Amino acid sequence: MKPKVAFFDFASCEGCQLAVLNCEDVLLDILGLVDIVEFREAMSETAPRFDVAFIEGSINREQDAERLRDIRARSTYLVAMGACACIGNVQARSNFIAPAENFQRVYGVEDRNRVQTDPEFWPLWAHTRVRAVHEIVPVDFELRGCPLVPEEFVHLVKSLVTGAIPRFSTQAVCVECKMLENECVYDQGETCMGQITRGGCKAICITNGYRCDGCRGVLPHANLTAHHGLLKSKGLSEPQITNRYRLFCSAESLGRVGRTGHDK
């Protein structure tokens, strides 16, 4: 019997699921190894249990957390897929703004007052804050990036099917960038998060003329003090540094550092 694989989406653009569908050259091979029983982007079939559950998106409401706990209870392996699921992604920036103020900025005062006084909206209003999947349930594997790297997805699926332990890069993006002989963005007058960001993306953004903004999250034991000093030496103000750290990593300790002083 082939393993049952399911994909679930929460707060996200669903770009990671589209990245999976774009694995056209190997997707048919994967379908020969597993049974996909839940995939809203492609099908609506459901199953009571899953051998592997892929979770895309951050967790924004308590009803999302309850749904995630139910999926975890019915899954052998649970995989956080993409930056939203792994580190909260850009939507976690809202954690630093009071919910009422945040809602007002987007919809205005009138709608803010309405959702706070109309009982119909109370369940929605009573949400917690934006959280990564691992803050709610145990996660067995992570596929990082915005979006995920297709090669890492294929590697993980093949490893789980064959009973092998999946291996992912433990290097910084900066190391991969140097191996590709890219010109350092600092030499171009730009700044970069590549020194402290988990690798595995083959420095795709820098290779294509941009910089690393850290969508794969922070490396364990990264020298954050040195990196903060580097950004400061290149002329970034404290608020600018905090914004760089919080762009993707608001749900990580790096993004939260501003609460203790760096953005004061």
Image (cartoon, helix red, strand yellow):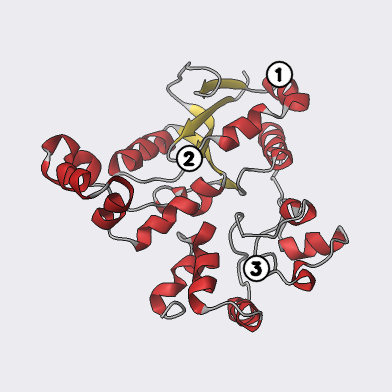
Say which residue label 2 marks: 12
In which quarter of the view is residue 256 placed?
Answer: bottom left
Q: Amino acid at mark 2?
A: Ser
Q: Residues within 10 Å of mark 1 (few under 14, many from 20)?
A: few
Residue beneath the point at 79% across and 72% down: 187
Q: Mark 2 and 3 residues: CB-CB less than 8 Å, in contact? A: no
The spot of residue 124 in percent (x, y) is 24, 40
Q: Amino acid at mark 1?
A: Gly
Q: Would you place residue 143 above or below residue 228 in this image? A: above
Q: Is residue 29 visible?
A: yes
Mark pair 1, 2: CA separation: 28 Å
Disc 1 element: loop
Q: Mark 2 or mark 3, which is nearer to you?
A: 2
Say which residue label 1 marks: 32
The spot of residue 2 in percent (x, y) is 63, 20
The one of 108 and 178 positioned closer to us in this rendering: 108
Residue beneath the point at 80% across and 60% down: 177
Q: Mark 3 or mark 1, which is nearer to you?
A: 3
The one of 49 and 145 positioned closer to us in this rendering: 145
